[in-house]
Amino acid sequence: MKIENIEIENFRNIEKMRLDFGDVNIIYGENAQGKTNLLEALYIFSGSKSFRGAKDADLIKFGADAAKLKIDFFSNERKQNAEITVKEKRIAKLNGIKKDSPLQLGEEIKVVEFSPAHLSMIKDGPEKRRKFIDGALCRIKSNYKAVLNEYRRCLLQRNVLLRDLQKNPGLSDMLYIWNGNFAKAGAKIIFQRLKYAEALEPYAEEIFSGLSGGKEKISLKIGGAFDYENLNGDGIYKKLIEKLEENTADDILNGSTSAGPHRDDVDILINGISARNFGSQGQQRSCVIALKLAEAGLLKEKTGIVPVALLDDVMSELDEKRQDYILNHIKSRQIFITCCDKNTVLRLKNGKTFHIVNGRAAGD
């Protein structure tokens, strides 16, 4: 898909703006001028809320009653348009027809984003890496969120029962039932994560190889309470049941479940070595960029729509060769990049540039 233009009114610090886009779009300027606000305006057309975690009311320019956004875009082999009005909540229209929910825009408008906050995927604990896999799966599998919610419900109920068993051992028969429910939902999640990581890795390898000039290789490995290798969904279920039974005494003592997908981690490796523990800042940033762009590639494979890539402050801590790859060698998708360094713009061979100053595009 391709976003052809955008019209913005009273969004964040942008009072009024209209821009026409190309395949590669560089948005540059000093900090706090509105570069990320422009990406944010594009992003919410995917149906999601702000990638910065902002409430809808925070998107409206101070002193204005509402923010209004409009894009013309090409998706599913036809030209379309979408509008979003932000008041107390977001109101969305697609091709002039009001939608029941802004989420419905995501059926036509596919976007993946990178922001500096995504570096926590490498730097922080396993929860961030699990969240990346789960979020990506929710975008390509309509039932995955329901399975995830069912697993969380089973985990909560099992933990409540474990704490009750500390005072009332007579409830032990109930643990057999909740072990089964928990393992059934948990096995589905583990198996889907494994299949997703397996499908994602070739896309990530290609991009990471380009970023590193072919000198480095990225790989992924999901680790848990037991070895998942060569196990199907049924095999994972049986092993998880065994592990739950093995850990029963400790789980009751601690009042929590010690095995399951909520405890798993995704190891991100560079040439077989942990990127988290041994990767440089540039290597870690390259890993996240590769994984986010790989997500876009896999999303295209599963949905038939090539997502737009929004890369916020992506150039920091990358050497010139890695920057050149992002600017000039990422093909077959529309890309938006924000940066502060004007020299970055000069290295762009083909594309459009937009200089943002105080919420306006220079020349407006």
Image (cartoon, rainbow, N blue to C red):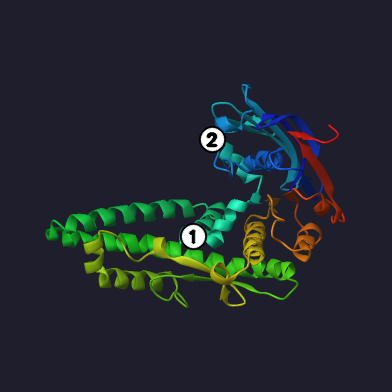
Q: Amino acid at mark 2?
A: Lys
Residue 232 tag number: none
Residue 129 in picture, x, y percent from top left: 51, 60
- Asked which quadrant contains residue 104, the reply is top right
Image quadrant containing the C terminus:
top right
- Circle 2 packing at 10 Å, graded few (<14), some (14-19), many (20+), is few
- Asked which quadrant contains residue 140, the reply is bottom right
- Asked which quadrant contains residue 93, the reply is top right
**Rendered residue at 86%/53% (across/down):** 346
Q: Is residue 43 above or below residue 239?
A: above
Question: For this view, does 84 lie left or right of residue 259?
Answer: right
Residue 59 in picture, x, y percent from top left: 61, 32
Residue 130 tag number: 1
- Circle 1 packing at 10 Å, graded few (<14), some (14-19), many (20+), is some
Q: Is residue 27 above or below residue 119?
A: above
Residue 55 tag number: 2
